[in-house]
Image (cartoon, rainbow, N blue to C red):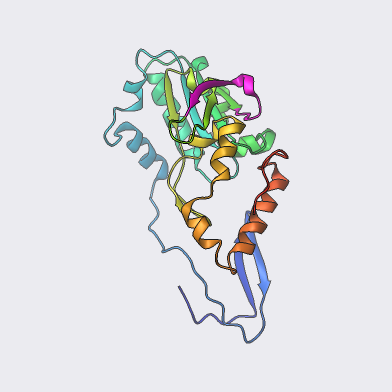
């Protein structure tokens, strides 16, 4: 944190570039950023080594031996996951273990977001080899026929319906990342855990705010930002028109 920044303009990251903010000359902005971390000299080699020697689990090539199908969940365009680094070595390990290439599906876990198609899908996957080797498909939460009904949860009686391609696969792999989140602080679970579900449980999960959000909404300085962000999300199709209204 730097409390002594003096500038008439301030550049903040926005989209794939940055946004310049004009400030009053007497403004003293506080810039909050992540601590600098050393970069891996060879990220691809590090990923391959991690997949070859996973912590507390068998290597993926051993995991797929004798199995007939596999489904790999990846996050959609709203999550900056480096799929280009790990999808190919992950699939290559499965192929080396005897998994047929036409039995492997990479499923984009969209949740209630719109599907990623064309150039956008190519950006999400990040490697043409993946498209040439296995199937890459989108999840559609509003297609009830594409889901398997697994009943309801024991406590809240929330219906659970998951994508049929994921449920019926012999090997199921969910990928994701740890990232800052304005409501939860940090996200540590793959988006695919929820985003492979049908619209009913997904909407039910989103209708209950996390504890950090319920606390922060009491701050007048934060609530307007939350409301603005949630309203803006509707423009990209994140919230169906039938979604209950939010505060």
In front of the other: 38 or 247: 247
Quarter the C terminus occupies: bottom right
The stretch drawn in magenta includes residue 25: no
Q: Is residue 214 left or right of residue 122?
A: left
Visible residue check, residue 227:
yes
Q: Is residue 190 left or right of residue 113?
A: left
Residue 245: percent from left, percent from top: 68, 47
Residue 110: percent from left, percent from top: 59, 35
Q: Residue at x 41, y 63 (%)?
A: 36
Quarter the N terminus occupies: bottom left
Visible residue check, residue 127:
no
In front of the other: 181 or 83: 181
Quarter of image, res 46 = top left
Q: Is residue 115 above or below residue 65?
A: below
Q: Residue at x 49, y 60 (%)?
A: 215
Residue farthest along the bottom direction in this orientation: 26
Q: Which residues are magenta?
A: 138-152
Q: Residue at x 52, y 56 (%)?
A: 213
Residue 178: percent from left, percent from top: 44, 48
Q: How many marks?
A: 0
In front of the other: 227 or 53: 227
Q: Is residue 192 left or right of residue 199?
A: left
Q: Is residue 102 above or below residue 225?
A: above
Residue 202: percent from left, percent from top: 57, 36
Quarter of image, res 49 = top left
């Amino acid at each position: 944190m730097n409390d002594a920044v003096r500038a008439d303009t301030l550049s903040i990251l926005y989209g794939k570039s940055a946004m310049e903010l004009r400030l009053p000359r007497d403004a003293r902005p506080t810039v909050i950023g992540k601590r600098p971390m050393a970069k891996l000299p060879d990220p691809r080699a590090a990923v391959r080594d991690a997949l070859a020697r996973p912590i507390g689990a068998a290597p993926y090539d051993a995991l797929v031996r004798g199995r007939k199908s596999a489904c790999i969940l990846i996050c959609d365009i709203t999550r900056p996951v480096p799929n280009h680094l790990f999808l190919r070595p992950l699939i290559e390990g499965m192929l080396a273990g005897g998994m047929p290439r036409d039995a492997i599906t990479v499923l984009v876990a969209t949740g209630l977001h719109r599907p990623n198609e064309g150039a956008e899908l190519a950006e999400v996957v990040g490697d043409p080899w993946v498209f040439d080797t296995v199937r890459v498909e989108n999840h559609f939460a509003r297609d009830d026929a594409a889901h398997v009904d697994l009943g309801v949860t024991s406590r809240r009686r929330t219906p659970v319906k998951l994508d049929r391609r994921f449920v019926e696969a012999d090997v199921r792999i969910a990928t994701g990342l740890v990232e800052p989140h304005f409501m939860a602080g940090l996200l540590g679970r793959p988006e695919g855990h929820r985003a492979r579900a049908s619209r009913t449980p997904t909407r039910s999960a989103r209708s209950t705010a996390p504890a950090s959000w319920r606390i922060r909404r009491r701050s007048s300085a934060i609530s307007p930002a939350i409301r603005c962000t949630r309203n803006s999300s509707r423009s990209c199709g994140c919230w169906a028109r039938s979604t209950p209204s939010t505060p």
